Image (cartoon, rainbow, N blue to C red):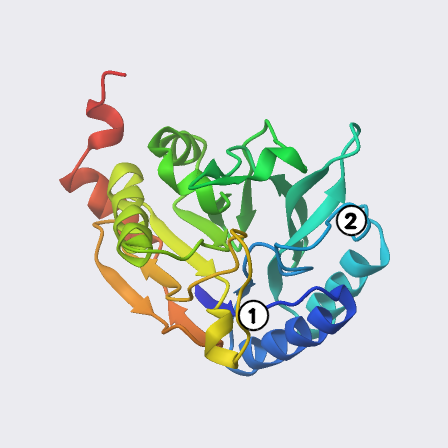
Amino acid sequence: MRIALCQIVSGPDPKANLELVAEGIRRAAEEGADLAVFPEATMACFGVKLAPLAEPLDGPWATEVRRLAREAGIAVVAGMFTPADDGRVTNTLLITGRGVEASYDKIHLFDAFGFAESTTVAPGAETVVITLDGVGIGFTTCYDVRFPGLFQKLADEGASVIVTPASWGSGEGKREQWELLVRARALDSTSWIVACGQGDPRSIGREPSGKAPTGIGHSLVATPLGLVHAQLGAEPGVEVVDVDPDAVEGARQAVPVLTNRRF
């Protein structure tokens, strides 16, 4: 399976961010990608009021992403915000294209490092695994990467590839934590981890403000044995990589943590 990491720096305007999505999809399709993965908060960056921007999954923003995916002939994952029943929003991954139509609402909210995502975002509750071209793909978002049980549950439910869009908060040691956690979750679940984050706003001359997690870049793909298979830098870019789902079975035979675990 060929997967494109579409690392962007989204801004506060959803329409302008659609242009970034269109360009990423175009580049991914040109390189023969089956799946294009965009970051969390592709629709609009953190640090702005999200409720006025939120749209349902059948709204114009998601509809345009579907059109772009359909015309390119590839599947697309992109982070957006949908209205929640209590006046907050949900942090949602739109998953569309190649006969797939699904969504995942972020389960673990980023109430850490002085930021309280739950103030404006309602948590999801359901895990999501889809099948694309015969491959089971599970979905997580950003802060979810700190919770190994979720990744193991997705593996139990048939995922051999787990996609993790993010908008990682900056700070001392945060890049090291990001890379360590992605690789550790690959080992926990003996699955491919495709982790696509927002690029660092500073890399395009935009100074982030406040405590909002607006991205550090360094998207990466980790093998089922925790090796770095591909990685980007801090700036926006598209990296197309081939992942071999058959490698998962070999990893699970060599390191059978899913069958050996007691808890």
In the image, residue 199 lies at what x, y percent? 48, 68
What amino acid does circle 2 point to? Ala
Label ID, residue 135: none
Q: Place residue 41 in its image quadrant.
A: bottom right
In the image, 26 versus 113, the foreground residue is 113
Tell whether 17 sits left or right of 245.
Answer: right
Counting residues from the N terminus, which is met first, the one under dot 2 or under dot 1? 1
Tell whether 224 sits left or right of 126.
Answer: left
In the image, residue 261 lies at what x, y percent? 22, 22
Could you give the CA–CA distance between mark 2 and mark 1, rounded to whole angstroms?
19 Å
Tell me the crowding category of disc 2: few under 14, some 14 to 19, or many 20 or more residues within 10 angstroms, Cα based: many
Q: Place residue 69 in its image quadrant.
A: bottom right
**SS at mark 1?**
loop
What amino acid does circle 1 point to? Val
**Image quadrant occupied by the C terminus:** top left
In the image, residue 102 lies at what x, y percent? 67, 45
In the image, 163 versus 110, the foreground residue is 110
Tell whether 205 sits left or right of 91.
Answer: left
Q: Are marks 2 and 1 in contact (CB under 8 Å)?
A: no
**SS at mark 2?**
loop
Label ID, residue 9: 1
**Image quadrant occupied by the N terminus:** bottom left
Tell whether 193 sits left or right of 52.
Answer: left
Label ID, residue 54: 2
Q: Place residue 157 in its image quadrant.
A: top left
Compared to residue 224, the image places residue 4 above or below, namely below
In the image, 22 versus 40, the foreground residue is 40
Residue at image position (36%, 28%) is 149
Residue at image position (30%, 46%) is 181
